[in-house]
Image (spheres, rainbow, N blue to C red):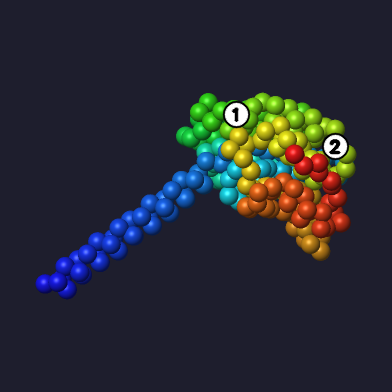
Amino acid sequence: MKLFICGITLLFINLAFLIGSFDSQTKAADDRSNCNTFSIVAFDPDTKEWGIAVASKYLAVGSAVPWAKSGIGAVATQSSVNVLLGNSALELMAKGKNAKETLDELMKSDEGRDIRQIGIIDKNGMTANYTGTKCNPWAGAKVGKNYSCQGNLLAGPQVLDAMAKGFEEAKGSLGVRLLLSLAEGEKAGGDKRGKQSAALLVVKPNGGPNALGDRWLDFRVDDHPNPIDELARIANLTNRFKAILKSK
């Protein structure tokens, strides 16, 4: 009888452990559904480069937000993230639609549009962005010539103002300007929860290794106390990229 009771007790303990484990896994999955972040998509008409830089208090933000293809454009998918929008946007632009037409079609068919945020730049440098009415405040976007900045759950609109100013005043290649823009956004408050990850993606024709593919710069920092500084350190290891950041 004692053995039976012990067996039943162990069974319940194991069940409790499994349920707890399942709950923690579910929570982890839920945590990855809300990509609250700030990003910039941009185009350099002189070098024919398209790029995106992004940072967030989110594990591995580079796995969810950046999408780009040379000769087509760049896309940032964020907030309650729908990563399917990234490839869909590139496919629509590859068929000849401009940034606004692409955005209109995507949002028309996305039932979760109220909690989405997306920024797009097309092959000609035309931009379009969308911030759903239910995105976590502060949320919004700021555009300029050949770029669009967007963010949600930010310290305030000053984050995007600083990003725009940083991009416009920065010197150097597109990758350098994108990262400097990101650094300025962080100095202005960035993601109001703090810092964790960052990513930089720049594409250009024949930009990949041995002139194959288009990935000219493709760097990620998935988990770090100062992800933008770490991203700059990694990027600076290649002669394709040289930038000095003035940390906050």
The residue that appears at 47% across and 50% down in the rendered structure is 28
Kindly indicate whether the residue at mark 2 contacts the one at mark 1 (C-beta within 8 angstroms): no
Say few, some or many: other residues with alpha carbon within 10 Å of mark 2 (under 14 / 14 to 19 / 20 or more): some
The residue lying at 11 percent from left, 72 percent from top is 1
Residue at image position (79%, 62%) is: 209
Local SS, label 2? loop
Label 2 belongs to which residue? Answer: 170
Residue 153: x %, y % from top left: 58, 33
Q: Can residue 42 be seen in the rendering of this structure?
A: no
Total numbered labels: 2
Above or below, 197 against 212 in this view is above
**Amino acid type, residue under disc 1 in the picture:** Ala
- Picture coordinates of residue 69, whole percent (x, y): 71, 48
- When asked about the image quadrant of residue 132, the answer is top right
Q: How far separated are the C-alphas under marks 1 and 2? A: 24 Å
Residue type, label 2:
Ala
Q: Residue furthest front?
A: 2
According to the image, label 1 marks what residue? 139
Query: Where does the image place residue 235, in percent across and percent down from the top left?
Result: 78, 53
> Going from the N terminus, do you reach mark 1 or mark 2 first?
1
> In percent of the image, x 24 and y 65: which residue is there?
11
- The residue closer to the viewer here, 23 or 208, is 23
Structural crowding at the residue carrying mark 1, measured as other residues with C-alpha within 10 Å and reported as few (<14), some (14–19) or many (≥20): many
